[in-house]
Amino acid sequence: MACFIVPAAEAVVTTIVEKSVKSKEMAEKEQTSHADYTSAGKIPFSRKLKWLNQMLWGGSALLAFEHVWHGEVVPFFPFLTAAQDPVSTAEMLHEMSTVGVGMAAVVTLAWAGLAGITHIIEKRPVETVAEKTE
Amino acid sequence: MTLLTSVLAAITATIVWYFCDRRRELKIGFLSLMFWGASLMWFVDAIFEYAELGADYFVPAGSDMLNDFFLGLSVVALGMIIWLVSLLFSDPLGVVRKSLKRQ
C-alpha cells in the first residue's frame, strides 16, 4: 500500500546524517596532514553511510514503481489510493508500521553487517590472486 | 517473481562490480546496492505475505506469475535507467562534457 514510505523517510534522515558526517571528516582531513590521513587506509564512515543511502533510496524508488504498477500510487491528490477512505487509511498505516518498519530494519541490519565485514577486511593485508600464485 | 528477478539483477551487478576494474567510474556499486536494497525490501514483503497465505504463497496463479515477472523486468529496466542517468549526470570520464563542448 505505502510501505516504501518508511524506508524513504529513513533515507531522508540518513542522507542528512551523511552530509553532516562528511563535512566533519573534511574538516578533520584539513587539520591532519595528508600523509597521516591516507596512511590510516580506512574507508570513511560517510562513505559507508552512502551505501545505506543508496540501498534505501534505490529500494524505495523501485518499490514506489511497483506501487504505481499496482495502482496504489496515483499522480493526483491524495496520491495514495488507500488514503481515500478511513478504513483503507487505517489498513495502510498498519502495513507501514509492520512491513514498512520491517523493510527499513532489515536494510539497516544488512548495511550494519556489510560495514562490519568491511571493517574486518580493512584489517587484513592486501593480497591479490596474482601475488598468491607467485 | 519480482523478488527473484530483483535478486538475480543484484547478483549480476555484484559479480560485475567484483570483476570490473572500472567499477568506480561506472558506478556499478550504486547499481548493485540499489538492487540489493529493493531485494531486501521485497524479501520482507514476501515474509509477511507468506505469514498470511502460508504454502499458497508458493503456488501463484499463472497470470499473477506472468504479471509479476513482467513487473520484475520493468523494475530492472527502471533501475538501469536510474543508474544510467546518474552515470551520465556525474560524467566521470568527461564524455558528455567533451561532446557538448564540440557542438
Image: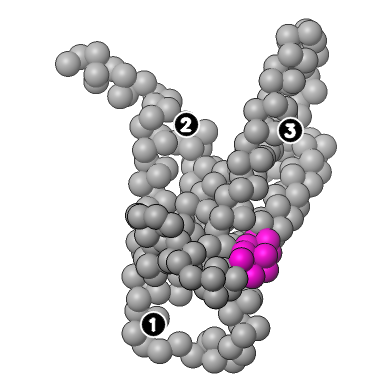
Q: In the rendered view, does A65 fall on the left or right side of A112?
A: left
Classify mark 2: helix, strand or loop.
helix
Q: Are marks 1 and 3 in contact (CB under 8 Å)?
A: no
Seen in the picture, residue A69 relative to A37 is either above or below; the reply is below
Classify mark 1: helix, strand or loop.
helix
Most common secondary structure along the magenta stretch: helix
At 24% from the left and 20% from the top, the residue drawn is B99
- Which residue sits furthest left? B103
Q: Is residue B20 magenta?
A: no
Same chain for mark 2 and mark 3? The answer is: no
| Sequence-earlier tag: 2 or 1 | 2
Residue that label 3 marks? A45
Which chain letter goes with mark 3? A
Q: In the rendered view, does B74 fall on the left or right side of B8?
A: left
Q: Amino acid at mark 2?
A: Glu
- Which residue sits furthest front? A86
Same chain for mark 2 and mark 1? The answer is: yes
Residue that label 2 marks? B25
Which chain letter goes with mark 2? B
- Magenta residues, start to end: A93-103
Query: Which dot marks residue B64?
Result: 1
